[in-house]
Amino acid sequence: DAKTTQPTSMDCAEGRAANLPCNHSTISGNEYVYWYRQIHSQGPQYIIHGLKNNETNEMASLIITEDRKSSTLILPHATLRDTAVYYCIVRFLNAGGTSYGKLTFGQGTILTVHP
Amino acid sequence: DTAVSQTPKYLVTQMGNDKSIKCEQNLGHDTMYWYKQDSKKFLKIMFSYNNKELIINETVPNRFSPKSPDKAHLNLHINSLELGDSAVYFCASSQGSGSKDTQYFGPGTRLTVL
């Protein structure tokens, strides 16, 4: 799986949008970008994933650049409960569309949301 | 209802003992995983099972033996516990199929070896 680079930490004011960047310059055409987060002392939680189009769900938006070498996770209105470590993961789903594959977690970005 | 559950939540034991951690998922998923998060907070996969078959074994010492009695359960047995086994162990499950392959994690089991 392609390596990702994320800032070590970021701050955000409550109610503001949190924009978390991720570089994945070695991503290949059949690798997806996944975002998970881990709130203190809990298991990781899936947020969103995408291949090349921008994606949005009830939690966040994912913006992937046209060359796919970087992406940004956007939490539109951050709350104190969004304070967590955010992991950007690039993973391969095979041609059959199945994957029993591992998630390779890096260091992630510690997002702290302030009142 | 808890989707992925683990027992126990905390486990404190002496070096050399044998212990088991249990995991159950009620999501109807085909694939289950064990991850280890060490003191530096790195999360690494240990094992993956699909329909009770071992799919991934990430060079884990053979003191660790996963067992899947059915596709809803994946237990982790650890023999001859060592200090370095102290960590938080997370179980996860996924449908294991293409873009639906989102992994859902349990709350973790904090293992402390004294």
Image (cartoon, grey):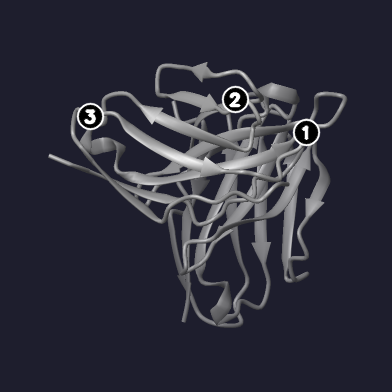
Q: Are marks 3 and 1 on the same chain?
A: yes
Look at discs 2 and 3 and give the one toward the viewer. Answer: 3
Residue shown at the point (64%, 32%) measured from the top left: A68
Instruction: Count how many numbered circles sit on residues in the image.
Output: 3
Residue A58 versus residue B29 in the image, above or below: above
Residue type at mark 3?
Arg
Query: Alpha carbon of mark 3 to alpha carbon of mark 1: how far?
Result: 36 Å
Circle 1 packing at 10 Å, graded few (<14), some (14-19), many (20+), is many
**Corner quadrant of residue B19:** bottom right
Q: Chain of mark 1?
A: A
Q: Residue furthest left?
A: A115
The chain letter under disc 3 is A
Residue closest to the eye, A36 or B47: A36
Give the CA distance from mark 2 to mark 1.
18 Å
In this picture, residue B62 sits left or right of residue B102 = right
Nearer the observer, B31 or A108:
A108
The chain letter for the residue carrying disc 2 is B
List the residue tagged with mark 2.
B27
The quadrant of the rendering that contains the N terminus of chain B is: top left
- Identified by mark 1, the residue type is Ser
Q: Which mark is residue A6?
A: none
> Which residue is located at x 59 percent, y 49 percent?
A4
**Whole-number angstrom distance, CA of label 2 to CA of label 3:** 34 Å
Q: Which image quadrant for residue B15?
A: bottom right
Residue A16's label in the rendered image is: 3
The residue at which mark 1 appears reads as A99
